[in-house]
């Protein structure tokens, strides 16, 4: 796990190594300062001249300045290394997520991925910072202090060594109790973020039904639940501090009592006042390093679960992979389904699609009708290989979609999904998702065909109008038309409209479809719709029912031969003739 995470250090190896180097120098210098101080005390006791005292004092001052400089440089390089590491880690995770298929996204959920890229990475960043600085400094200082305590105090320093196993056993027991609690906390963080994300996206629904107080109460319960678990975990971890302080302070009292007795009884021959002073200083250093180690232990305990969650994201393999020798060109917009069956999970009992056999010639306009849950969207998502078929194959341009380079295939297929998404930025920036090199004239032409130019020009800033995240400052119909214009700019070989004109009136819908015939006549157009009027002029209409193609034909043929289509048509036209 650590090896996997350290791959994200990359260009920040140099500041990491410099941090370690300067921390070692700082620890060595600080370990010798009490030794020189003790020598200075003994020389004063023995009546040393002022020049010798000033010389020793000067040495101490130089060592203090060097220690300060080493610590300052180490702090600077440590901050650079840890911040850079977290930047690379977030970048690696984000790039990895971009390779995920819908199946992988469904496995983690978007809220969990956000938590892992924010809270979890922050925890790991703090741990990395403590590891390369404090976790190196504290053990070195601890070892140096114990060694110097032996040099100064002899066998009396053995008491410092005795407390370490006691603390180690205590920390181990604390870890076993705390880890399950932290694991529960992070899972609940995912659910809390999911609730926040859902609430913000559905804010209009919440306000429309006056459910603010209910949502506040639900959030409060979730937050309180996390608070209880986190408090329990922190309470367990907090046992480190009293255990450590009891051991160390007990040890210091022991040194003072026994040391004082030895000084008095031996008249300073076994141990003197300067050495006792050094022993107490080293004892305090040992105390401070143990406190640092305790803090490191707590941080590592908290972040170990974060590390596992991050590695899960980095090690996840996309369910969709490019072939070894991918096809890099799509010949045309023809589509063929060959005995296709599909289910979203291998463990699922029922197929979402079953026994689909279908052939669409390039340039055709195909309409798809069917009730909710009949897998209309699932059918078209297989064309762009957003999912792979469970059985059978889907061919585009006469080639199995699994043989294409993914970017090549998806650049040839433009999808306007059921949920229309716009990004924060100007209208121009959103339109250029379809074609980054599109000129202003090309964008305006696409918007005219999508019936969006008129309302865009009504805005004070026109095409430079700023859109809020998700396009919340435009209506549903305007959002749909912008998404259609974005798809048209791509000039794809296959255009899929997944119920993407549901929020526009029938006249505008008709004008949009008329624009397709003039702007992209060679493009295969697949239109999923709820209105018969949206597909009645299609070259082929599919009627979906229970994951199967119940009927296929033209408008007139289906009126005669398909009861489902005829019933839908009559319901929408009240039994009359629709002349649109």
Image (tube, helix red, strand yellow):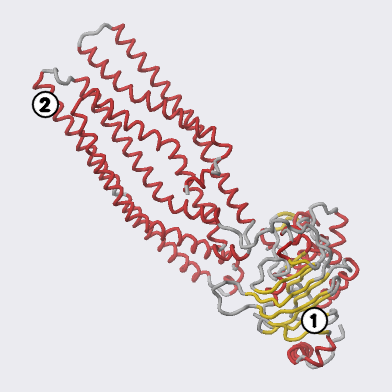
Q: Quadrant of residue 325?
A: bottom right
Residue 291 in the image, given as x and y percentages of width and height: 32, 39
The C terminus: image quadrant: bottom right
Crowdedness near tag 2: few (<14), some (14–19) or many (≥20) residues, C-alpha within 10 Å: few
Q: Earlier in the sequence, mark 2 or mark 1?
A: 2
Q: Callout 1 environment at 10 Å: few (<14), some (14 to 19), or many (20+)?
A: many
Report the side of 36 relative to 84 (left or right).
left
Work out which residue is located at the far left of the displayed protein and give it: 265
Separation of disc 2 and disc 1 at Cα?
A: 102 Å
Q: As drawn, which residue projects farthest toward the right? A: 518
Task: Judge whether 112 appears above or below 39 on screen.
Answer: below
Indicate the position of residue 217 as horizontal and vertical percent values: 46, 68
121 versus 495 height, above or below: above
User: Splitting the image into 4 quarters, where does residue 396 fall?
Assistant: bottom right
Residue beneath the point at 51% across and 43% down: 6
In this view, the residue in front, 271 or 453, is 271
Q: Which residue is mark 2?
A: 261
Image coords of residue 297 (percent x, y) = 36, 45
At 47% from the left and 53% from the top, the residue drawn is 308
At a point 80% along the width and 59% down the height, the residue shown is 329
> Residue 444: which quarter of the image?
bottom right
Residue reaching furthest to the front:
325
Circle 1 SS class: strand
Mark 2 vs mark 1: give the one in front.
Answer: 1
Residue 19 spot, x, y in % from top left: 48, 32
Residue at 43% across, 51% down: 304
Query: Which residue matches tag 1?
Result: 541
């Amino acid at each position: 796990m650590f090896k996997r995470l350290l791959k994200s250090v990359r260009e920040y190896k140099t500041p990491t190594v410099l941090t370690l180097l300067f921390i070692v120098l700082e620890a060595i210098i600080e370990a010798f300062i009490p030794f020189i101080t003790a020598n200075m005390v003994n020389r004063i006791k023995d009546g040393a001249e002022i020049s010798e005292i000033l010389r020793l004092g000067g040495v101490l001052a130089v060592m203090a300045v060097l220690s300060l400089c080493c610590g300052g440089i180490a702090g600077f390089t440590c901050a650079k290394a840890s911040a850079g590491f977290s930047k690379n880690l977030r970048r690696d995770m984000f790039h990895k997520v971009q390779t995920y298929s819908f199946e992988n996204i469904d496995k983690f959920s978007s809220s969990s991925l956000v938590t892992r890229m924010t809270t979890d990475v922050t925890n790991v960043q703090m741990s990395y910072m403590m590891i390369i600085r404090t976790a190196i400094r504290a053990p070195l200082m601890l070892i140096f202090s114990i060694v110097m305590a032996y040099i100064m105090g002899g066998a009396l320093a053995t008491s410092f060594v005795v407390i370490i196993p006691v603390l180690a056993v205590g920390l181990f027991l604390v870890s076993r109790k705390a880890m399950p609690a932290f694991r529960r906390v992070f899972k609940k963080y995912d659910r809390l973020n999911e609730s926040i994300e859902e609430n913000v996206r559905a804010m209009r629904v919440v306000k429309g039904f006056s459910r603010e107080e209910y949502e506040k109460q639900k959030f409060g319960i979730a937050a309180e639940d996390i608070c209880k678990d986190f408090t329990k975990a922190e309470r367990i971890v907090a046992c480190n501090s009293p255990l450590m302080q009891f051991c160390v302070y007990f040890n210091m009292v022991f040194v003072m009592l026994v040391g004082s007795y030895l000084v008095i009884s031996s008249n300073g021959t076994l141990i003197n006042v300067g050495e006792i002073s050094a022993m107490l200083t080293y004892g305090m250093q040992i105390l401070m390093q143990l406190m640092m180690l305790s803090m490191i232990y707590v941080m590592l305990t908290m972040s170990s679960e974060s590390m596992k969650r991050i590695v899960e994201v980095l090690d996840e393999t996309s369910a969709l992979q490019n072939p070894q020798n991918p096809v890099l060109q799509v010949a045309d917009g023809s589509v063929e389904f060959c005995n296709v069956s599909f289910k979203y999970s291998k463990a699922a009992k029922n197929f979402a699609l079953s026994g689909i056999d279908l052939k669409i010639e390039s340039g055709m306009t195909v309409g798809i009708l069917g009730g909710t849950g009949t897998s209309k969207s699932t059918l078209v998502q297989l064309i762009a290989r957003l999912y792979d078929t469970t059985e059978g194959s889907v061919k585009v341009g006469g080639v199995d979609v699994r043989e294409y380079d993914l970017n090549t295939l998806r650049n040839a297929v433009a999808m306007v999904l059921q949920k229309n998404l716009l990004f924060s930025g100007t209208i121009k920036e959103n339109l250029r998702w379809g074609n980054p090199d599109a000129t202003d004239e090309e964008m305006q032409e696409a918007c005219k065909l999508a019936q969006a130019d008129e309302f865009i020009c009504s805005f004070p800033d026109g095409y430079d109008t700023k859109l809020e995240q998700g396009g919340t400052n435009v209506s549903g119909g305007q959002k749909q038309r912008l998404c259609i214009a974005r798809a048209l700019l791509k000039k794809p070989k296959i255009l899929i409209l997944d119920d993407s004109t549901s929020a526009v009136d029938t006249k505008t819908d008709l004008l949009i479809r008329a624009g397709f015939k003039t702007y992209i006549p060679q493009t295969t157009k697949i239109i999923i719709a709820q209105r018969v009027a949206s597909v009645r002029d299609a070259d082929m209409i599919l009627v979906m029912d229970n994951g199967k193609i119940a009927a296929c034909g033209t408008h007139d043929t289906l009126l005669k031969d398909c009861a489902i289509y005829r019933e839908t048509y009559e319901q929408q036209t009240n039994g009359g003739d629709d002349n649109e």
